Image (spheres, helix red, strand yellow):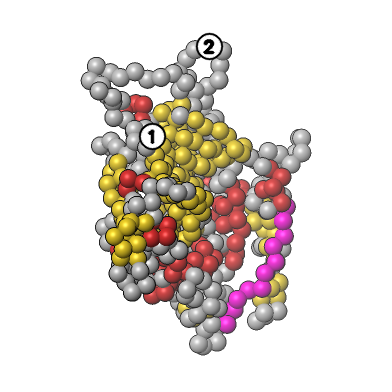
């Protein structure tokens, strides 16, 4: 009897497609060829693609008067599929360690068809690909943020209001919307909700870490919406530990194959630092010149100087602390002390206050350069990796990867520069009739093994 491992095929327990008017349904479970589910910390919505083939006798033909013919028709024209249809889907786990991919609990969890591509119609068979997304992605295109948000509102409060009152969703918790220490007043200007939420993320300063760690991300996972600071995502304990090995693990005397479930099947290093790009973006050091329209004064150049070295010991890292090269050979200064970009901005002073105020609305001194530093350093190293299916993982999680040292001698010694903690920027859970996999794009801000994180 074949061992059940994480690479084994998963069971499509339920896959019911509803017509736009929700009057007609069809069970497409036997027709599914493959299903790919996607998450990304820089995407405000989950997406998926479903490929299917059916023999064209799946659903009774519909007449204009609402009646149906006896002769069944294909799904594409019989439902019909025109975009906006709902999919009730549940994929059972293939091992005890995996959880189900479940979009069937209630109508608010259903996936929606955003487009249909690769349509092939033959006399007795049809094939096509359904592109799916969450309900909120469609709602985002039909509503706008037009109200004023008071300057005494913290950013996380505004995020919750937009999600609840404009997107009409409850797919978030107090834990998934992280508290910010800075307040910010703004007017929606009839922009789309996702546009505003992503814009607010760049201004957020986490309450638990302070100004040095500005920079949030807004994204959706299978568990709901998240508004989280990069710094606190980095502080998470690893969800799983993976090992890269070219040898094939054997089953123990009990037939236990868990070790195989946490092997890295394939990986590639997509990017390993881009120093010139980071210098152009002012990641390590910059001048910030702010104009105050109330006093007609400019920021003192020295006061507006941002240096990474002032924040190195205040930020969390996936690897070792940030180390930068010297400006030139023999110089006592490194790249974290010399400005490589100049930022200019007009301060927002008193524009949204009911009473005259000299306070700056969400001072960019507290978030602008810090968030630019955090976003750009996060992509110091980028890896693509394929592992056996692990539905417990989500975008934004941290995992630990162990890579062997490249050596002419056999041994189990780890490469301490490449091994360590990585954050999942994006992932794809893939299901087909023969196997199940999870592919990920991993990022981290520094090299090496973080000694403090390694203890946990």
Above/below status of 218 relative to 239: below
Instruction: Give the image location of residue 309, x and y in percent.
Output: 61, 48
Question: Which residue carries the number 1 mark?
Answer: 435
Q: How many marks?
A: 2
Q: Secondary structure at mark 2?
A: loop
Taking the spot 68% from the left edge, 56% from the top edge, the residue there is 286
Above/below status of 96 relative to 343: above
Question: Magenta region, mostly helix, strand or loop?
Answer: loop
Q: State the residue in front, 339 or 221.
A: 221
Above/below status of 419 relative to 107: above
Instruction: Give the image location of residue 407, x and y in percent.
Output: 56, 16
Marks 1/2: CA–CA distance: 34 Å
Splitting the image into 4 quarters, where does residue 270 fall? top right
User: In the rendered view of the protein, which quadrant contains the N terminus?
Assistant: top left
Q: Which mark is residue 185?
A: none
Splitting the image into 4 quarters, where does residue 388 fall? top left
- The residue segment tinted magenta is 339-351
**Residue furthest toward the left?**
254
Q: State the residue in front, 415 or 142.
A: 142
Image check: 454 left or right of 29? right
**Is 261 in the magenta?**
no
Taking the spot 37% from the left edge, 72% from the top edge, the residue there is 64
**Is 343 in the magenta?**
yes
Whether residue 224 is visible: no
Whether residue 330 is visible: yes
Question: Which residue carries the number 2 mark?
Answer: 409
Q: Crowding near pointer 2: few (<14 within 10 Å), some, many (20+)?
A: few
């Amino acid at each position: 009897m074949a061992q059940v491992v994480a690479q084994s095929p998963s069971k499509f327990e339920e896959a019911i497609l509803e017509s736009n008017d929700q009057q007609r349904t069809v069970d497409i479970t036997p027709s599914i060829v493959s299903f790919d589910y996607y998450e990304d910390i820089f995407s405000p919505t989950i997406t998926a693609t479903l490929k299917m083939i059916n023999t064209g006798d799946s659903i009774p033909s519909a007449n204009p008067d609402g009646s149906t013919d006896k002769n069944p028709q294909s799904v594409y024209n019989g439902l019909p599929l025109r975009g906006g249809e709902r999919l009730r889907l549940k994929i059972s786990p293939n091992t005890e360690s995996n959880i189900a991919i479940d979009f069937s609990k209630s109508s608010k969890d259903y996936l929606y068809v955003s487009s249909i591509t690769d349509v092939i119609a033959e006399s007795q068979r049809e094939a096509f690909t359904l592109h799916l997304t969450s309900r909120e992605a469609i709602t985002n295109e039909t509503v706008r943020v037009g109200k004023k948000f008071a300057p005494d509102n913290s950013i996380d409060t505004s995020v919750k209001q937009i999600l609840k009152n404009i997107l009409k969703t409850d797919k978030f918790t107090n834990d998934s919307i992280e508290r910010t220490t800075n307040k910010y007043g703004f007017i929606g200007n009839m922009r789309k909700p996702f546009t505003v939420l992503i814009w607010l993320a760049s201004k957020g300063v986490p309450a638990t870490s302070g100004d040095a760690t500005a920079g949030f991300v807004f994204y959706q996972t299978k568990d709901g919406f998240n508004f989280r600071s990069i710094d606190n995502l980095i502080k998470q304990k690893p969800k799983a530990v993976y090992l890269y090995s070219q040898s094939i693990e054997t089953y123990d005397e009990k037939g236990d194959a868990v070790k195989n479930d946490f092997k890295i099947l394939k990986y590639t290093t997509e990017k390993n630092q881009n120093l010139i790009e980071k210098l152009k973006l002012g990641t390590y050091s910059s001048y910030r010149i702010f104009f105050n329209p109330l006093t007609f004064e400019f920021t003192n150049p020295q006061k507006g100087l941002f240096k990474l070295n002032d924040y190195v010991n205040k930020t969390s890292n996936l690897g070792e602390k940030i180390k930068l090269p010297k400006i030139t050979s023999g110089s006592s200064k490194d790249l974290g002390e010399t400005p490589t970009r100049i930022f200019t901005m007009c301060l927002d002073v008193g524009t949204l206050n009911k009473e005259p105020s000299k306070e700056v609305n969400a001072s960019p001194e507290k978030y602008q350069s810090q968030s630019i530093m955090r976003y750009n350093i996060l992509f110091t190293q980028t890896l693509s990796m394929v592992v056996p299916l692990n539905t417990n993982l989500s975008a934004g999680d941290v995992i630990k990867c162990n890579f062997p040292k490249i050596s002419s001698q056999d041994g189990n010694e780890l490469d301490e520069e490449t091994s360590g903690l990585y954050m999942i920027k994006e992932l794809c859970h893939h299901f087909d009739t023969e196997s199940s996999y999870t592919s990920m794009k991993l990022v981290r801000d520094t090299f090496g093994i973080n000694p403090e994180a390694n203890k946990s």
